[in-house]
Every structure is written in structure tokens, then in C-alpha cells.
Image (cartoon, rainbow, N blue to C red):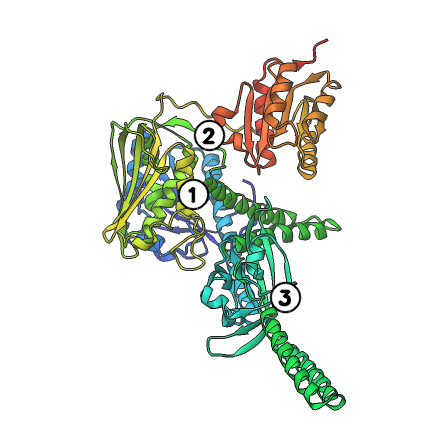
Amino acid sequence: MTEHTLPACELIICAPLRGDATSLQRLFTQGYLTRYLSTLDEVAAALGEDTGIIVFTEEALRQDLSTLAEALERQPTWSDIPLVLLASDAKRSGRGNDLLRRQLPAAATNLVILERPLSGASLQSSVAAAWRSRLRQFEMRDRLAELAQERERLQTLLENLPVGVCFMDAQGRTLVSNPFYEQYVPGQRIPSQQPQEAARWTALDNSGRLLPPERFPGARALAGERVKGQDFYHTSATGEESWLRVSAVPLHDTGQQIIGATTVIADISEEKRAELALRRFNEELEVQVEERTRTLALTLSELQRETTERSRAEEQLRQSLKMEAVGQLTGGIAHDFNNMLTGVLGALDLMKIKNKGQLAGLERYMEAAQHSAHRAAALTQRLLAFSRRQSLESRPMSANDLILALQDLLQGTVSEQISVTLELDPTAPWILADANQLENALLNLVINARDAMPDGGVVTLATYPVTVTEPAAEDEALPPGDYVCIEVRDTGTGIPERLLDKVLEPFFTTKPQGQGTGLGLSMVYGFARQSNGRLTLASDASGTRVCVYLPTAEQRREPQRAEPAELVQGAGQTILLVEDDDAVRLVNQEALQALGYRVWSAAEGKAALRLLDQIPQLDLLVTDVGLPGLNGRQLAEVIQQLRPRLPVLFLTGYAEGALSRTSFLGGNMELMTKPFTLDQLAAQVAAMLSGSANRAVAPS
């Protein structure tokens, strides 16, 4: 048995039959801190945060399970103790195992059923896998504690800064701010979006004209400009006057799309008071000199002129020092991406430092960077879902079968006071949709329903066929055709009528700050539209009903999904790589060469065509979709005319023409969506090369 470095946690064995208990204790004497308990009540009493795995036999299920159920439900949110159940009958069918699962508490979600008799090696392997899973939970617990401490330190820093700081979203709503900022900018929105507040801020532009609200720093930053040091004259609701200097910077995502802004406000009242005092002193001195050198009449006339000029200058100054406090645009998505990028960049910096002398521990930093990158990729997919620019792999499928497969997961997502019921029409035809995106959509809808029922209730998922015969003028209406409606309704608090038109907007959420990105419903809406369907929403005091309409499929057979290929080394096959981004091209070229392939690379389509004459034998074309000049699809068509039956692998973040894989891809073509791992790239390349019976050879 392989030895592991284990934390101080236990492997609990519960076997009422003495022979089973003796065998199991003997089997796990090495590498584990084992503890034998004869009843599940004793197991429940022994459960704690340091419990590792519970191995128990089917005979233990003859006892009362209520105490165990209560103990499992008391687990922290990060904890899901692995349970290994040794079934007694090796001839038991899969349905029998389902009956065993139903005997266990609902909180026993991390369950592995092993049918006896089985070898000791098989049992040890299963327990070792569960043990690794539990160790990852302990790592997650420690990481969550570290993140909570980091967040507390950041909040303390923000609250004690001598300047006002605000992060806002792309709509100008405050996401994160400190008390200094809120003192001058109430209302959770930038002043340019609050007419009453905008009137309290006065500044002048470079030509001396009153600065309009749409030219305030926050509004300009949301439009993509960097604003440094705009002075404003501010009057509070209580009449207090201040000079404030405002700076604002836009925030971008990895695609250089503006996702918010950050604003900083500094109080420069003392500086302005000194400046104004000096200016007034100079003006008064000038008046005195003029009074002594001119006649009384000329002096009075000059004094009148100077008074007029001074009034105009002071008005201009009051206006020019009022253009700075627009700082609400960095929260939500900007805050999430900053956290993700901090994880990636910090891990890379630590790896760079480590690499100078010591390699031990680099795996932790790699995992941290990968975790942050995967979080960013997931958030990008949700944004793409709303914009309807994600790549969908629509296939014929049964909505009923998918919902039945999800039932346990959905029930586990809600609290025990909420029941999930199904009303599935057995006559409902198959639909044409992306199964993964549909699962995510249903999970989002059930989570929203759960949050609307804090005191418990019922979530119902229903399906039924719908036929539309008459076309409608409204854009949101269903085109004529056959559809299946997937309805999710709850008995919750409902949505106020005044918010019904806003809930589908991206980043709009009715949840408390920090408990939602506002992308859930908008992602489902985008998925339905991109799938040639629609989404409708109705709500009142009795609950909310969301209907997702998806088109029916013309066939009732779901194509077989290819099993993911293992990391297979190449055998010297030749690959032409076309990618306009230098960094991506370098990484992909190095990765493919490390896998054993011969790689030719080009930055755009014309260069790739010139290289083609130098490649006598080509096995695979790997190309980005969005290339300058010839795009990836056009390049593939040209090369396939010269090299018939050449397999083509497209790489894309998103592309307008790649939204529907079935219409975008031709023969011998596949599509991968960025970002992807080296394992995924290696598996896809190996699968395409192994599926190509005839290689494309240049004509002699």
C-alpha cells in the first residue's frame, strides 16, 4: 500500500459483524489512523471537522439513522465527509444500490457503494481516492480561512485610508467604497447619474466652461478615459463647502472590454484656501496701488471693473474645482477579476522566486494560479452566455431525462425545508440544446428559487410541448414552430412588479451586496435566445414562474460523445499552427513540440499559405478563428482545397461565426474554446490525428 503524509484525522470503521470489523481493521493498519465503532450512533457522536472517511457495512443500516443524519447536516459548508458503504450482495442490481442510497440520509451526498466480495486492493484503492478527496476539502477549509483574513485586512485598510476610494461596475453603481468616499457621494451611484447630487459638484473644463455631468471623471472613466486630478468645488447637503480632487481609471477584462472603474477622492480644501487667500491678497494690493495712483473717479471705476472680474473669476474657480468625485465603478465583476488576477500573478511571482533556487512547493502555486484562472474562465463563460457569444454544442436530447438525472443535485442545492418536485410530460419530444448549458441554466433557476424561499417551500420543474402557429411582431415572441417548455416555479416571496423589467439585465441583483453577481437570470436568458428559444418570467405574491422554451429536435438519437483521450505523445506528426497572438502562439507551439510533434507556426493566413509550400507532408492544421486578413475558417477552406481531407482544429475565445458549432464546422473539423489545459489540447490533437486515416500530402 502506498504511504501518504496524512493530517491528524481518522478513518472510522463501523461493522456490526465481528468478522468484518477484524478484516477491515487489519486491512487499514498502515498509513491510516483507524478507529472502530460498533454503531452508527457512535459514529455520529465521533464526527468532527477532523474526521477523514467513514467505512461501514450494509449491516449497520439496520440501525436508526436519524442521529447520523443530524451529524452530517451539521457539517460546515466546506465539509462533505466521504462515506464508503460495503454492500452485502454482489448480485445486487443497480436498482438495488439506488435503494441503499435512499436508506441513507439526504446529507450523505459523498457516497461510494462497493459490492462484496471484493479484493483488498480494490477497497484500499477506493478508500485512498476518497481520502485524497477529503484532503482537498481540508485544503479548501484552510484557503477559505486565509481569504476571510485577507478580506478583513483589506476592509480595515479601506476604512482607514485618508482618501475616498470606490470601485464601481459598468453602470456606475458602487460595489466597494470606504466611509470617506460615502461622505461625499451618497446614493450608491456616481454623481453624474444623480441630478441632485451632480448639482453639488462644480468644475470648469479647459476652456473655462461649466463642466457637464457627463464629463465628470467617473463618467469619462466608464467611457474608457483615464482622468487624473480634476478639481471640484463641493457643497454638502448641510451646506459644508470643500475642495476635492478626483481621479478615475477604467477597468478592463481580458478582452479589453470595460467592466467598471475606480475613483479616488482627496480633500484639498487647505491647499485651495491658501491659494485663494494669496490670490485675494494680490488682488486687494493691486486695488490699493490703483487707488493711490489714479483719481478717485478712475479708482471707483477701476474698483467696479475689478469687482466684476473677481466675481467672474471666483465663479469660474468654484466651477473648475467641482469635477472630481465620480467614483463608483469598480465593484462586482472588477472586484472578482482583481481577486482572480491577484491569485494568478501572485502564484506566478512566487514560482519565479522559487525557480531561482528551489523547486519544492511549486505545485501549490501552480494549483492556486490554475484555480484563479478557472474562476476567471467560468465568469467569462457566464458573460458570454448573456452576450450570446459562447460556443454552443447543440445536440438532440431528452429534457425529461436530463431533469431526472439532475434531481438529486437540485435537491441537494436547496435546504431541507424546500422540496423539489417534478411534473414531466412523458409525451414531450426531444429538444435541440447544449446539455451542459441547460444544466447550468436549471441550476441557476433553482438557486434563485431557493433564495426566494428563506422559510421553505416547493420548487416545481415541469415540461410540456408547445406549438406556435402565428408569427408575432415582438422580438421576445416565439417564432412559429414546435417547442418544449421547461418551467421552474416556486412558492417564494415573488419579485416586485417594478423590478420585473430589470431582473434580466446583466449585473442586476436583488440579493445583498457580495451574495450575487447579477448574471444568473441574464445567462439563462442569453442561453435561451442563442438556442433559438425564448425565456418568459411572471411573478406575484404567491411565487415566481420562469419558462424556458427550447426548439424540438428532428431526431431522437443523441450522438455518442467521444471519451476524453489520455495525454498521448505524438509520433513526429507535422502540425501547422496559425495564431496572431504572439504569447498564445509561443505557448501552444512549445506545448505541441513537447508532446512530440513537428510544428510550423505563422501569425496570419497569408504567411501560413506561404509556409504550406515548404511542408511536404502535413497531418493537422491548428488555427485561431479570429485572424487578421483571412479568418481561420476561410484559411481552412483554402488549405483543405490544396490538401484534401486534412483535419482542422479551430481555437477560439468566441467568434460571431462560431456560435453554432453545427453550422460553423465542416468536414474533418473540430472546435476548442479558450482557455483550455494542456491535457485537453493533447487529447483533442491525438483524437483528431488517430481519426484521420489518410494524411494530406502535397501534390507532386
Residue 18 in view in this figure: no
Q: Residue at x 54, y 40 (%)?
A: 1
Percent across and percent down for residue 362 are 65, 48
Residue at image position (69%, 90%) is 296
The type of residue carrying mark 3 is: Gly
Residue under pointer 1: 523
- Given residues 480 and 485, the one toward you in this image is 480
Q: Nearer the viewer, mark 2 or mark 1?
A: 1
Marks counted in the figure total 3
Mark 3, mark 1: which one is toward the viewer?
A: 3
Distance CA(mark 2)–CA(mark 3): 57 Å
Q: Where in the figure is residue 162, as x and y percent of width and height?
A: 59, 73
Q: Earlier in the sequence, mark 2 or mark 3?
A: 3
Residue beneath disc 3? 208
Classify mark 2: helix, strand or loop: loop
Closer to the camera, 370 or 482?
482
Under mark 2, the amino acid is Glu
On the image, numbered disc 2 is attached to which residue? Answer: 393
